[in-house]
Image (cartoon, rainbow, N blue to C red):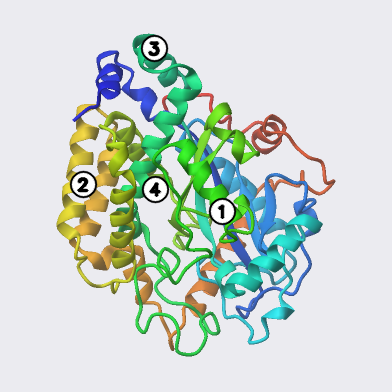
Amino acid sequence: MFSEIGQLIFDNEAVAKTSDFTMGLEIEMQRVDENGNFSQEPYPAAAGNEQTNPWITNDFLETMSEVVTPPAAHALDAMHYLFSINNALRSALSPGELLWPLSMPPRLPKDKSAIPLAKMGPEKEAYLKEWVKRHGFSAGTPCGAHINLSIDPHVFELVLDQMGDQFKSKVELQNYLYAKVAQGFLRYRWVITYLFGASPIAEANYFKSGEGPKKPIRSIRQSSHGFGNPFTGDYTNVQRYVDRIEKGVADGKLISDYEFHGAVRFKGNSHLKELPKTGINYLELRMLDLDPSSSVGIRTNTLRFIRLLASYFIMSPALNPDEVQKVIAHSDKMNEAVSEEHPNDVSKYQANARAFLQSLEMYANRIQLGPEYQEELQDLQDRVENPLTTPSAKLLTHIKDGSLTDYALNRAKRYQQSALQSIRPFKGFENHAKLSANDLKHELFKGSWEPDKDKDQA
């Protein structure tokens, strides 16, 4: 089951470190009015400066609010950050404003030019205008949950200490392990789409007449009908990743390297060309729809599952470099097939998904993870056996006249009321101060919660 590195980690009783990832979250949601239209209100002043506040910003549209959490040592810590910053955003909204809880946007006006693009400074705004020319307005409007995942430094130290002859430097090891984990997520992206897909239909005017799926599907956002540029990356290693994106820019297929929005992105240096030399610091996972059953768009158990996957990929044998592109291309086709299945149907890859989750359960048992991971795996195995329990299938029961607007607004109003009843809503963004992660932690949780204090809690 284990690779050479995995066996080394296991023999040194350091497996816990492979699931002890630092996590950061980026959750996008559209601001809407009480009728389910894009909000006409200005950017909420109490949320701080949209161009300089790193914790609440916007993306693509002025109405697309993005909550960003500092890195946290545990899933539960990340969720505490997310709830607190999400509440701060909600308390800053104008009366009657809500946060749309679905990945697919609310109904779009026929004249989409009336919706302002995000104010991100001249350079980014020019990029957004060019992006709309190339891809159309609708393609930029879906929202999602992004997870930033960073491997515990102890893993690198242990491997370098025992296997230093195989890696010239820590940077080489980082790039190798992060690429291996990325390949794992891309290889099994279709499983994530099945288990967590939650965008079965689009609202009015998203698709042009005659375009788009003719029936509900598991995930519009994760399919070829979803977000943005279809340009595919090369994840064989970090150098080939960089070369592929740079060639895409040179060939005019990408406006800039910023436009590469693959399901996984290597992060670590703002200058892409330097990434192989300076090393990958974390992965950005971009394969989750918003979970409308949560006020913040994602659940703690989902984060635990993602961490389990990443640990499994670290410990498992790597793909042969010559096969990476072929395996991921095949997995992309599987993901497209799964995303376009009717949510109520048993997946054509049910047996594959069952086998993969059973392998994960064996791994979790072997490394003696806690009961919360076992319970989550059992729930997800139930989703594989019964598609009616998947998020997308559950949403079908709320469709009314071909729309999820009533459901989305009911959820949005409930979540907004709950946030406004918070005992001590955070007001620290109003003075436009650019808070550091430590300052934010202190201001958000003083006297109530201290993230990262207990290393054993989640």
Rendering coords of residue 206 (x, y %): 54, 79
Query: How far across and how far down the image is residue 266, in percent?
Result: 51, 40
**Type of the residue with mark 4:** Thr
Whole-angstrom CA distance, mark 3 to mark 2, is 32 Å
Q: Is residue 115 above or below residue 319?
A: below
**Which comes sooner in the sequence, label 2 or label 1?**
1
Residue 413 picture quarter: bottom right
Residue at image position (42%, 63%) is 222
Q: Which residue is mark 3?
A: 164
Say which residue label 2 marks: 356
Residue 455 visible in this rendered orientation of the protein: no
Mark toward the viewer: 2 or 1: 2
Q: Report the quarter where the N terminus lies.
A: top left
Q: Secondary structure at mark 4?
A: helix
Mark 1 vs mark 3: which is more N-terminal? 1
Locate residue 270 relative to residue 340 in the image: left or right.
right
Name the residue nearer the viewer: 395 or 26.
Answer: 26
Local secondary structure at mark 1:
strand
- The amino acid type found where label 2 is placed reads Phe
Q: What residue is pinned by disc 4?
A: 302
